[in-house]
Structure formats: C-alpha cells, structure tokens
Image (tube, rainbow, N blue to C red):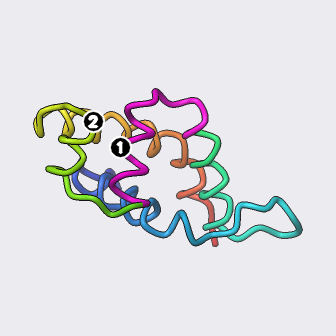
Amino acid sequence: MKQNAREVDKLVEEYLKIYPYISKEKVGDLTKNQKIAICISDLLSIMPEKEVNFINFRYIKGWTIVKIAQEMNYSQQMIYVVRKKALKKIYHGINHLLKEKS
C-alpha cells in the first residue's frame, strides 16, 4: 500500500523522536530500530548542515518551528521547506529497513 506524504512524514518523525535513545553500537544482532538509528546517523553525516541543524533542533532538542526559524535566521516557511527535504531524504534512506520484517 502506497503511503501519502503526510503518513511518510509522521513515520519518519516517530523514528527521529526515538533516535537519540537507541543504541547505535554495531554489536551482535541488531533490532530493526537499531538498524534504522544507525542508518539515520549515517544519513545525518552526509546531509546538508541546515537540514542536520533542523533535525537536531526539532527532534533532539524539541524546539518549536518558531524558535528554530529564529535560531537559523530563516522564515517559518523556509523551515518547513528544510523540514520537508530532510524528512524525505531520511525516508528514502531508511525505506528498505521499514519494509524488513521485525
């Protein structure tokens, strides 16, 4: 079943919210969540700085869009553009793991 854009965003956001709390050590049998967290780490290491900053501010620090816009010196509309690009890249990077059986 194909997911719409909002469902995809919500799915990625759920993983980003738990991302800081999942072990990223590549030891033994990894859970699906660990594989996804490792993949997100790898993606963040190659994504543009503004997208990584957004991810850190929004999902690690829990900041509001307004606060992020002020910190990054962008309009709120631009923050939503950055958000969309970042979530799309992460989704494409973890999609193969999402389809994996637990």
Quarter of the figure that contains the N terminus: bottom left
Residue 80: image location, x then y, percent: 19, 40
Instruction: Give the amino acid at mark 1.
Output: Phe
Give the crowd class for mark 2: few <14, some 14-19, many >=20 residues within 10 Å: few
Per the rendering, the mark at residue 72 is 2
Q: Against 88, is 41 above or below?
A: below
26 vs 62, left or right, is: right
Q: Which numbered mark, 2 or 1, is in the foreground of this view?
A: 2
* 22 in the magenta segment: no
Quarter of the figure that contains the C terminus: bottom right
Dot 2 or dot 1, earlier in sequence: 1
Residue 60: image location, x then y, percent: 43, 60
Residue that appears at 44% across and 36% down: 89
**Residue underneath mark 1:** 54
Magenta stretch, residue numbers: 44-60
**Which image quadrant is residue 62 in?**
bottom left
Say which of 40 and 71 sits in front: 71
**Which image quadrant is residue 16 in?**
bottom left
> Label 1 near label 2: C-beta < 8 Å?
yes
Residue that appears at 44% across and 45% down: 91
* 57 in the magenta segment: yes
The number of discs equals 2
